[in-house]
Image (cartoon, helix red, strand yellow):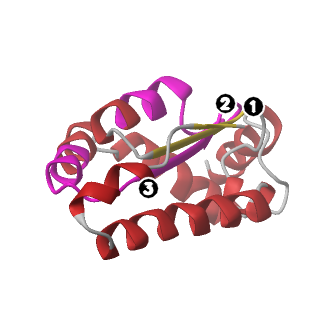
């Protein structure tokens, strides 16, 4: 069964041929056993904790559909939302430099926000970034 799952992962889904058979099977296992209700509950917890959130995704991600990413972002209500047209599931690799710059700016925004008096905080909020 592993060779078939590997074939589907590479030829149908279009992931890198470097993905091993073991990794391909693990990928399918994780996808099939994902507890989406629990993921949503975690997102609600994060949102209710008032933690600053940055969401980044790619429209061409073959593992996490845009609708799923959008649903999670709707719950999280991120301070920064980045959505790339391309980049796949590994935007941390395919968009590393751009993400690093965005994460740095995002981090500075809430670190500066904490250091400023309440009346100055509104000017430090970051808005959605379209990429």
Whether tag 2 and tag 3 are in contact, CB under 8 A, the answer is no
Residue at x 60%, y 69% (from the top left corner): 104
Quickly name the residue at label 3.
124
* Distance from the alpha carbon under mark 1 to that under mark 2: 5 Å
Q: Earlier in the sequence, mark 1 or mark 3?
A: 1
Pick the residue in front: 60 or 20.
60
Pair 1/3: label in front: 3
Residue at x 39%, y 65% (from the top left corner): 110
Quickly name the residue at label 1.
85
Asked whether residue 106 is drawn in magenta, I would say no
* Distance from the alpha carbon under mark 1 to that under mark 3: 27 Å
Q: Residues within 10 Å of mark 1 (few under 14, many from 20)?
A: few
Residue at x 49%, y 48% (from the top left corner): 126
* Magenta span of residues: 43-72
Report helix, strand or loop for mark 3: helix
Report helix, strand or loop for mark 2: loop
Q: Residues within 10 Å of mark 3 (few under 14, many from 20)?
A: some
Q: Where is residue 65 shown, x and y percent of the image?
A: 54, 29
Quarter of the rendering occupied by the C terminus: top right
Whether tag 1 and tag 2 are in contact, CB under 8 A, the answer is yes
Q: Where is residue 96 shown, x and y percent of the image?
A: 75, 63
Q: Earlier in the sequence, mark 2 or mark 3?
A: 2
Quickly name the residue at label 2.
59
In the picture, the disc for residue 44 is none
Whether tag 1 and tag 3 are in contact, CB under 8 A, the answer is no
């Amino acid at each position: 069964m592993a060779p078939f799952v590997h074939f589907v992962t590479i030829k149908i889904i279009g992931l890198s041929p470097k993905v091993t058979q073991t990794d391909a099977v693990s990928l399918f296992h994780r996808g099939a056993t994902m507890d989406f209700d629990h993921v949503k509950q975690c997102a609600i917890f994060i949102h209710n904790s008032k933690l600053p959130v940055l969401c980044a995704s790619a429209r061409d991600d073959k593992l996490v559909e845009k609708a799923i990413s959008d649903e999670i972002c709707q719950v999280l209500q991120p301070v920064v939302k980045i959505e790339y047209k391309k980049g796949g599931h590994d935007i941390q690799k395919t968009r590393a430099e751009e993400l690093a710059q965005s994460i740095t700016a995002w981090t500075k925004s809430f670190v500066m926000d904490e250091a400023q008096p309440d009346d100055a905080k509104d000017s430090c909020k970051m808005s959605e970034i379209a990429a």
